[in-house]
Amino acid sequence: MNFQQFKDILHNGVWKQNTGVVQLLGMCPLLAVSSTVVNGVSLGLATAFVMAMSGAAVSPIRQLVPNEIRIPVYILIIAVLVTVVQYVMNAYMYGLYVVLGIFIPLIVTNCIVLARVEAFASKNPALPAALDGFAMGLGLTCVLAVLGGMREIIGKGTLLSGIDLALGDAAKDWVIHVIPNYKGFLLAILPPGAFIGLGCLIAGKNWFNLRAERKARGDSTAVAAADSGFAPAAH
Amino acid sequence: MSASPTKESLITALNLLVFALIGTAVLASTFFLTRDRIRQSEEAEKLNLISQIVPPALFDNDIIKDTLNIAPDPLLGNSDDTIAYRARLHGEPSAVVLEAVAPDGYAGKISLILSIRANGEVAGVRVVTHKETPGLGDYIELPKSPWIKGFDGKSDAVYKDNDWKVKKDGGQFEYMAGATITPRAVVKTVHKALLYFEANRDKLFAASVPQPRPEDSK
């Protein structure tokens, strides 16, 4: 794997094919746990870890698995990895484990994990496969962090609340009260806030892309902007 | 592909079996590696919760180990066996920790843990899990509001049946406008748990028989 490849995979995962705002895969955890930064980032990192490991695990055995049963085998591998993560979180980050609850085992059903294993890891060597999984997971984590931050600030007026659940009691003072004496805005915390926030993020990303494209063409009128292919398919 | 279909399916099945075995082995070893640690975390969490509702001055026994299985009872609202923890001071029973479930919260069940002193007074109540509306019905949680401390020191002797209601219904308990279903459910459940305690006092405080730990029922 040369440097260019490395850069391409990373760029693809974190930005160009971002799970959260471009591919729109794995919406269930994205919308459910993004009520605070800490929740979002924790689940994002757990997903990134599972994706990297499943990429690394599937790639070496891709020649051994008969084509007919590849999906069950991949799912089996992913399920094993997720359960390992669940045990470890239960043992060492109990508070966070309780907060994330059902969404940890649900990483198995997050279609982005299987999608990357099937689309990338089953056709590439182990190192790029692991990197691809990690980059995709990192992209998801970034979206979860931004969305979680938006919802947390608007909904509760804080940032990093609950960080002591992830990093222990020492981190209790890290909570930032962005807006002091804030009464809270319930809508942002409830599920609709997640949809509205995600919509804004997608719009922002599309706007940014279109602008960058126009600039690249040196054409400020940008007639072709509308058909530049930014119509992410929902799954 | 020259192999016969039967042979081919056998090979495929064998292949899947091998992966299943490897997966099981990995899971089993992780389970054994993390088991003790998970048990410790859960016990620490439990002790943390218990020490919030049973003042440490009230017991000197190993409260986590002094347990009693409680069969499902309509007064407690539990559908499975739960565990009661007994607090003892110098060998004398001082309080008991019970789990109770309010079936009629605004959004489903609310599970509570409460401790009752030997004299029948509530020593403390905490909400363990609930699905009440955030920002509206969740004032039953301690970090959100001190409401739940309103039960401390109350007993069936102090408050008569009609007092065990929210003020809106003519009782003695505070509530917040806009969310009365939630406190109503909690008040009713605490009262029923007290009735359960009165009816089963002797059984609850019976000398502890060393019991085998209920193996991971979850």
Image: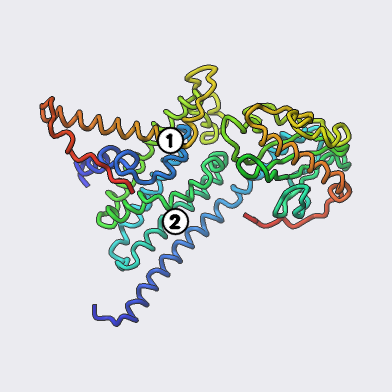
The kind of residue tagged 1 is Ala
Residue A107 lies left or right of residue B4; in this view the side is right
Corner quadrant of residue B216: bottom right
Local crowd size for mark 2, using a 10 Å CA cut-off: few (<14), some (14–19), many (≥20): many
Foreground pick, A82 / B36: A82
Relative side of B163 to A62, left or right: right
The extreme front residue here reads: B169
Local secondary structure at mark 2: helix
Chain of the residue on which disc 1 is drawn: A
The spot of residue B134 in percent (x, y) is 56, 33
Query: Element at badge 1?
Result: helix
| Residue A82's disc number | none
Name the chain letter of the residue that bears numbered label 2.
Answer: A
Q: How far from the left and from the top, in percent, is residue A196?
A: 39, 33
Q: Which residue is mark 1?
A: A194
B24 or B148: which is nearer to us?
Answer: B148
How far apart in space, not on screen, are marks 2 and 1 (Cα)?
A: 27 Å
Residue B38: x %, y % from top left:
59, 48
Residue at x 36%, y 56% (from the top left corner): A57
The first of marks 2 and 1 along the sequence is 2
Q: Amino acid at mark 2?
A: Ala
Nearer to us: label 2 or label 1: 1
For disc 2, the marked residue is A79
